[in-house]
Image (spheres, helix red, strand yellow):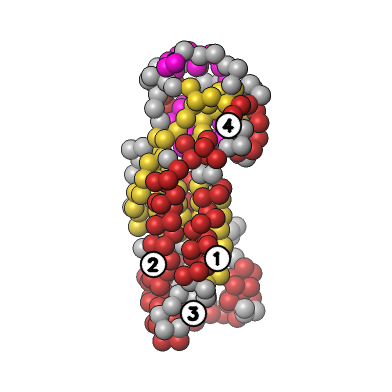
Amino acid sequence: MNLIELEAFVSVVDHGSIVAAAAALHLTQSAVTRRVQNLEDALGVSLLDRQTRPMQPTLAGRETYEFARPVLSSVSDLRTAITQNGEPSGEFRFGLSRSFDDTVLARPIQNLRTKFPKLKFHAFVQSSGRLLEGLASRRLDAAIVNLPEGSVAPVSLVAERIGMNPIRVVATESARFNQPATLKELSASPWLVHPPGCPMRQLLETALLQQGLPFETAVETEGWELHFSLISNGVGLGLLPSDVFHSCPQRKNMNIVKVKDFSPKLAVWVLHSKHIGRLEPVVRCLRDAVQQYLKVRT
């Protein structure tokens, strides 16, 4: 057993296939296959279920992966400390929940590029559920996610709650509701929502269910621009995070509806692997930039 065999195995698990691992390691597929087989021979167990797509580790493979990951991270940290004077290099893959305004990434990316010029950055804006999957599969190094207030972050990750993001109920400017309205009054109107898995939708559905009220959707869509347009044109009510509403170009055509029995909030979490190693200062820089954004915009 040696480091290159561990590296090949971990890469296969991270990327889900021999083909993708070979491309990431700049090796031939046969070389990756041989290294993984050598590791299996040394341990005397099968580490991969080769019948699944994407390829999944066996039980022994998952245990081996959990041991191998910090070992490789420590070796990478040692190499960085010696050859780069401790300055992080390589790639940093991070995500931001779609519940945010996309512009929240502009300042963090500027800060990261300035402070860590030897890093190559990959930024993804996805649903919080997709980001959690990316962290679990090691496709992402870190993520800023929104979770319903009261939710607990996965124990398999290092988690820090850095703020709260109030959610606003928004209607077209011409809509007439009592101020404050009740959730029962609003339930007579359809809603513009993100697909299932969205934490804002989850908060709304739970609140309506608790009161025995109907939940009618007008349109399900992921893009904020379409949300803004449909709300301002009176197609339905929307749920917008406070920062998204304040940056919305159509906000003059929309009104916030105060609701006496529904005040949803999303908790903002910074999540990363327990084996982040040399990338820890990079995660801190990302956290600080997003935290500052939240203080200004919410």
Element assignment for label 1: strand
Judge depth for marks 4 and 3 and give the one in front: 4
Discs 2, 3 touching: Cβ within 8 Å: no
Q: Amino acid at mark 1?
A: Phe
Q: CA distance from mark 2 to mark 4?
A: 38 Å
Q: Amino acid at mark 3?
A: Glu
Q: Check the image and report above or below for 281 versus 243.
A: below
Q: Which residues are magenta?
A: 179-205
Residue 288 in percent (x, y) is at 39, 57
- Which quadrant of the view contains residue 75? bottom left
Q: CA distance from mark 1 to mark 4?
A: 32 Å
Residue bearing the label numbered 3 = 5
Residue bearing the label numbered 2 = 280
Q: Is residue 87 magenta?
A: no
Q: Amino acid at mark 4?
A: Arg
Residue bearing the label numbered 1 = 121
Q: Amino acid at mark 2?
A: Glu
State the residue in front, 73 or 48.
73
Q: CA distance from mark 2 to mark 3?
A: 26 Å
Discs 1, 2 touching: Cβ within 8 Å: no
> Furthest-bottom residue in view?
82
Element assignment for label 2: helix
Q: Which label number is shown at residue 251? A: 4
Is 232 left or right of 164, judged from the image as shown?
Answer: right
